[in-house]
Amino acid sequence: MRISGAESQVMEALWRCGPLTPDGVVAEVGEAHDWAPGTVKTLVTRLLRKGAIAGSREAGGYLYRPLITRDDYVQSESQGLVDRLFGGEVAPLVAHFAQHQALTAKDVQLLKDLIAEIEDDG
């Protein structure tokens, strides 16, 4: 399932705040991005059609909730990026960032710790 950048803002609000009313989604997303309520409603409709969120009438009104977890979304998007840009290999991705981004000492230590953890588990 492909979720656009704008749609991901709606998803982030639902993951962060839990079930939201239509007005709650507009308040969380629309105001932060200066989007009209109609724009937010269009994004919600797209996500409903994709099966990424569900809406239901409850005692407190109509509520939207995510049907996919943030972890599953991040995993899918990350794998898609690695597949598209780096032939499915993680090492070239890390090398790219190491060459083109200023890694802090903390970043380097976190990478070393991760490698050590992977080696211990392997």
Image (tube, grey):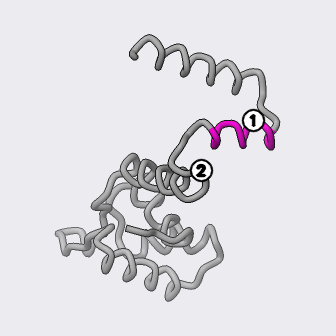
* Residue behind mark 2: 86
Nearest the camera: 112 or 39?
A: 112
Residue 112, given in percent of the width and then of the height, sits at: 62, 18
Q: Element type at marker 1?
A: helix
Q: Is residue 15 left or right of residue 61?
A: right
Where residue 60 appears, as percent x and y from the top left, is: 24, 68
Estimate how packed mark 1 is, as few (under 14), some (14 to 19) or many (20 or more) residues with alpha carbons within 10 Å: few
Q: Specify the quadrant of the image occupied by residue 22.
A: bottom left
Please tell me how many numbered marks the rendered image carries.
2
Q: Which span of residues is magenta-colored?
A: 92-101
Residue toward you, 59 or 115? 115
Q: Is mark 2 on a helix, strand or loop?
A: helix
Mark 2 Cα shell of 10 Å, populated few (<14), some (14-19), many (≥20) = some
Q: Of the residues tagged 1 and 2, which is closer to the observer?
A: 2
Query: Is the C-beta separation of discs 1 and 2 under 8 Å?
Result: no
Which residue type does callout 2 highlight?
Phe
| Apparent side of residue 16 relative to residue 58 in the rendered image (left or right) | right
Expressed as whole percent of the image width and height from the top left, the position of residue 99 reads 79, 38
Residue identified by numbered label 1? 98
Give the residue drawn at x 18%, y 70%. 58
Q: Which residue lies furthest to the bottom in this view?
A: 38
Q: In the rendering, at what x and y percent does residue 109 appear?
A: 67, 18
Is residue 3 shown in magenta? no
Q: In which quarter of the image is the N terminus?
A: bottom left
Callout 1, which amino acid?
Ala
